[in-house]
Amino acid sequence: MLESQLQALAASAQQRIDAAASPDALEAVRVEVLGRKGALAEVSKGMGKLTPTDRVRIGKLLNSTKTTLESALDARLKSFADAALAARLDAEWLDVTLPAPGTRPGALHPLTRIQQELEDLFTSMGVAVLDGPEVESEYNNFDALNIPPDHPARDMQDTFWLSSGQCLRTHTSPVQVRGMAKLGPPLLMIAPGRVFRNEEVDASHEHTFYQLEGMMVDRNVSIAHMLYFMRTLLKHIFNREVTVRLRPGYFPFVEPGFELDIQCLICNGSGCPVCKQSGWVELLPCGLVHPNVLRMGGIDPDRWGGFAFGLGLTRLVMMRYGIDDIRWLQSGDLRFLRQF
Ligand code: PHE
């Protein structure tokens, strides 16, 4: 009687062990079957009523059932642990033979790159590279360039004024003034740098952009000299002849003054946002240095003459790389920067 009860108990316990879905479920089986108040303990209570021979036989059976179930529980528990470990190893698997993702070498910003290229070109031609401050005096930015306070040309550039009375330079032309004071005639200089205007920002206008000023003061300087320098510069940057046109242009510090336009290299002249649909991009305002500017720079205009140009470095970069929106340049956007 007890014998068949034990066998049925062992069989059902074994079934539950096999079917247990988790270590917790196994533990529940262990408590219910092998625990102090478990099913086996319950069976052993009936042992007292047995004859001594039966008691020995059933006692042995009880023990062996207990051992069998205990080892079945242990084995099943171990299989859970093994499966968990296997899953973890699988998830954390690392292919040490895989090449490392590689660090990208940094690159120069396109503006820096073109500025350096132009500095190299002009240095090789014996031209001095000068620098000036971004916070400039009103005098250097305007007055010394033949733009007196009441001159309507002050309205041509929307200026950021500082409470000190100084301004953020609106162009690199104040470095002309500094160059004349520093080097005296004859002089041949460029001055690349950052300039600021209170502009409405759009695809072709930024409040902060870059120019490259050029100035030559010597005896008998003519427009031919000026054109030579500007053509050399453009050819160097674009590596090919670029279609240009010269228009009269007004700047108080040059006389005569010109605008040199290049045919838009983004749309090849057919019209796009960068060239405002005109097919041409204003790139190189220039002219012969106004006698007043020479005079204020301490140079006798009867003995010396000169030319000056103010290249739009930012636009040049856009043309060379086919960038159709000026805002990319200062965006800091890695998708943009990684292309250079
Ligand atoms: N400084 C002028 C500007 O930014 C450009 C310029 C420079 C024109 C030199 C003529 C000569 O608008």
Image (cartoon, helix red, strand yellow):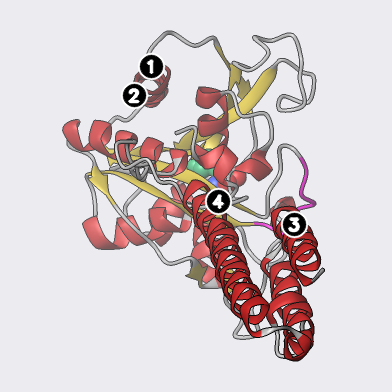
Task: Please name which of the two marks, 1 or 3, marks the residue nearer to the observer.
Answer: 3
Q: Amino acid at mark 1?
A: Lys
Q: Which residue is mark 2?
A: 225
Q: Is residue 13 covered in magenta?
A: no
Name which quarter of the figure residue 249 lies in. top right
Mark 4, ligand 1, within 8 Å: the answer is: no
Question: Which numbered disc, 4 or 1, marks the residue closer to the eye?
Answer: 4
From the top left corner, tell me how far across and down residue 322 is, in percent. Answer: 58, 23
Amino acid residing under circle 3: Ala
For marks 2 and 1 on the same chain, the one whose residue lies earlier in the sequence:
2
Which image quadrant: the N terminus? bottom right
Corner quadrant of residue 35:
bottom right
Which corner quadrant holds the C terminus?
top left
Real-space Cα separation, disc 2 to disc 3, in angstroms: 108 Å
Q: Is residue 87 visible?
A: yes
Residue holding disc 1: 235
Q: Which residues are magenta?
A: 197-202
Q: Amino acid at mark 2?
A: His
- Residue tagged 4: 87
Q: Secondary structure at mark 1?
A: helix
Nearer the N terminus, badge 4 or badge 2?
Answer: 4
Taking depth in this image into account, of 64 and 182 the one nearest to the observer is 64
From the viewer's perspective, tell me whether residue 266 is left or right of residue 102. Answer: right
The span from disc 2 to disc 1 (Cα, nearest Å) is 16 Å
Element class at badge 3 = helix
